[in-house]
């Protein structure tokens, strides 16, 4: 038996690919073959020659029909989703908090879906963590965007008539993206400050050579994420941050709470108090923004500061982000592949904790709570449950 992993074309705006040549080779060593829709990898510069031994088809419908496992960046089209079958497995970025209709439509297919946005934040799962790998690229890109728009040099420069002082950069949020932003801004020579509501991040911020901004607000949550702040905590945070924001030449915000609208941390008044020519890059723009006045996909003026709301930041550098994405998916899939068959071990906390739908129902308790649905019963199949391969399907 051979497990078939299918790669349908991504959404029109998506440049990344969930498969690259190195991962194709590793899958072959696991007795898995890859079925790819023509054109699905073009925007990531993953050419047919670089991918190697894969099978090509013309349509996403052919990919769905011929695959046991689907790897995807973003949501499948409505037609592709409707074509999924019971026992089939879908994994990748599935926007699990998008809404009740979205989750119920996935469940109705009978397919088992794994949303890697839900991956438990434990050490063993780090090599599978899509949010971290793609977030690192986002933090890097935010600094490049800011540096390109800033009317000042980032580093200190000495010239014949004097010295140019370095720019002041403030990064709000010290997760993977924020720490990458801090490191990149430091490499460019800026004076950097970092802030996060989780006090345990102070050491990480300072280890990168930045100064930690202490607001007196602590909001450590579950799974390595920050919890949502109360109204009183949010006001205290804003008051303490106001001076740091006003002093900054560049502000980069990266704060997000899974399943929630991005918290508004920086008010319009705080941005209006920034120096003329200041630049704000709001990495959370697609989730509503951390900065009041952010517009996703646009540059807008708030006072005399330029507020940038970039979207799909990882897609700006698809060669490396596709490589990271594909390796994350490979590491998640590998424990399920044994002797040319797909076997899902539901006793594995990483697998169980990432599952979104199974056998016609939503199975993730956290998603159910966010969407206001009844908490689902845990999955109770045998510890190892084989899934049918494409070659065993009646119509394969």
Image: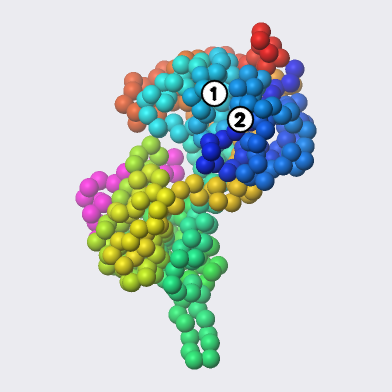
Name the image quarter holding residue 391: top right
Q: Answer left or right for 266 relative to 322.
A: left
Q: Answer left or right for 220 relative to 156.
A: left
User: Extreme front residue here?
Assistant: 58
Q: Can residue 365 be seen in this view?
A: no
- Does 179 sit above or below residue 335? below
Residue 87 at x, y percent in the picture? 58, 15
The residue under label 1 is 80
Residue range corresponding to the magenta coloring = 219-239
Report if the CB atoms under discs 2 and 1 are less than 8 Å apart.
yes
Identify the secondary structure beneath mark 2.
Answer: loop
| Residue 238 in magenta stretch | yes
| Residue 2 in magenta stretch | no
Looking at the rendering, in which quadrant would you find the N terminus? top right
Mark drawn on residue 207:
none
Q: Which residue is drawn at 41% across and 17% down?
A: 377
As measured in the structure, the alpha-carbon distance from the residue carrying label 2 to the one carrying label 1 is 9 Å
Depth check: give the residue in front, 109 or 166. Answer: 109
Depth check: give the residue in front, 389 or 335. Answer: 389
Identify the secondary structure beneath mark 1.
Answer: helix
Q: Can residue 103 be seen in this view?
A: yes
Q: Residue at x 55, y 19 (%)?
A: 84
User: Extreme left residue here?
Assistant: 232
Residue 93 at x, y percent in the picture? 52, 35
Residue 232 at x, y percent in the picture? 21, 50
For marks 2 and 1, the one nearer the N-term is: 2
Mark drawn on residue 8:
2
């Amino acid at each position: 038996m051979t497990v078939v992993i299918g790669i349908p074309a991504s959404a029109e705006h998506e440049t990344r690919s969930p498969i690259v040549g190195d991962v194709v080779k590793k899958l072959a060593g696991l007795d898995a073959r890859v079925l790819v829709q023509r054109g699905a990898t073009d925007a990531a510069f993953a050419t047919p020659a670089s991918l190697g031994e894969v099978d090509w088809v013309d349509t996403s419908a052919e990919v769905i029909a011929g695959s046991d496992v689907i790897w995807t960046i973003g949501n499948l089209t409505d037609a592709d989703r409707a074509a999924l079958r019971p026992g089939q497995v879908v994994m990748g970025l599935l926007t699990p908090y998008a809404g009740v209709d979205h989750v119920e439509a996935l469940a109705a297919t009978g397919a088992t879906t794994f949303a890697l946005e839900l991956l438990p934040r434990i050490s063993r799962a780090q090599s599978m963590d899509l949010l971290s790998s793609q977030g690192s690229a986002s933090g890097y890109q935010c600094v490049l965007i800011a540096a390109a728009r800033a009317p000042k040099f980032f580093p200190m420069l000495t010239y014949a008539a004097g010295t140019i002082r370095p720019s002041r950069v403030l990064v709000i949020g010290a997760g993977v993206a924020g720490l990458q932003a801090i490191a990149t801004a430091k490499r460019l020579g800026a004076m950097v400050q970092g802030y996060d509501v989780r006090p345990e991040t102070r050491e990480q911020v300072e280890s990168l050579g930045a100064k930690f901004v202490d607001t007196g607000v602590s909001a450590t949550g579950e799974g390595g994420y920050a919890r949502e702040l109360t109204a009183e905590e949010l006001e205290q945070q804003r008051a303490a941050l106001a001076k740091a924001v006003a002093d900054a030449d560049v502000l980069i915000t990266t704060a997000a709470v899974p399943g929630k609208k991005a918290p508004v941390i920086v008010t319009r008044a705080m941005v209006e108090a920034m120096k003329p020519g200041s630049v704000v890059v709001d990495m959370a723009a697609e989730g509503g923004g951390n900065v009041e006045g952010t517009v996703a996909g646009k540059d807008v003026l708030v006072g005399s500061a330029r507020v940038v709301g970039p979207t799909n930041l990882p897609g700006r550098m698809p060669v490396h982000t596709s490589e990271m994405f594909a390796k994350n998916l490979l590491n998640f899939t590998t424990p399920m592949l044994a002797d040319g068959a797909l076997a899902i071990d539901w006793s594995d906390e990483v697998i169980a904790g990432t599952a979104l739908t199974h056998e016609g129902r939503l199975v993730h308790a956290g998603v159910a709570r966010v969407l206001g649905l009844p908490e689902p019963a845990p999955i109770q199949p045998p510890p190892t449950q084989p899934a049918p391969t494409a070659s065993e399907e009646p119509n394969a």
